[in-house]
Image: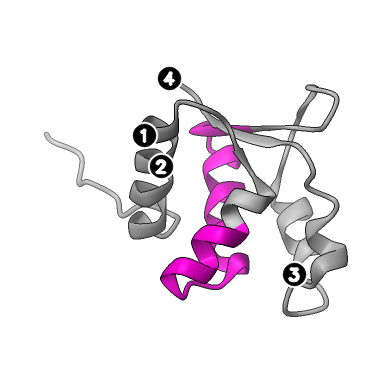
Amino acid sequence: MQQPQLDPLWDEGISSFLYGEYEKRQQALTIDDLQMFANEHAVRIGDILETLFLMAIYGEWIYADAEGRERVLDEDALNELYAKGRLGPEDLSAFDGVWIPIS
């Protein structure tokens, strides 16, 4: 018996866009890139980060800090990020590394 296809846990439009940008650039995405995408496409940076967090949690992408060490992201980290509501510059400064899809 065939298993039903589950809907993705993240925003599929944002996910597809991020994969496309990575492929086009052939380099990891930074928080500056993400902020630029958000501004250009009228998307909240929080929605982009939530999508990346969820993809990292489920093994689709990784986040590496500024020293190149992979940081494990989990739902607790995502909840902590959103504990105070909308993200500000101080929240984004904690992500000075890079986002990379797992091939």
As helix, strand or loop, the secondary structure at mark 3 comes to: loop
Image coords of residue 38 (percent x, y): 53, 66
Q: Which residue is mark 1?
A: 24
Please determine whether, in this image, residue 7 is positioned above or below residue 23. below
**Picture quadrant of residue 73:** top right
As helix, strand or loop, the secondary structure at mark 2 comes to: helix
What distance separates the C-alpha of mark 2 from that of mark 1?
A: 5 Å
What distance separates the C-alpha of mark 4 from that of mark 3?
A: 28 Å
Tags 2 and 1 touching, CB below 8 Å: yes
Q: Which residue is mark 2?
A: 21
Kind of residue indicated by mark 2 = Glu
Q: Which residue is mark 3?
A: 82
- Picture disc at residue 103: 4
What distance separates the C-alpha of mark 3 from that of mark 1?
A: 30 Å
Image coords of residue 84 (percent x, y): 82, 78
Q: Is 61 colored magenta in this rendering?
A: yes
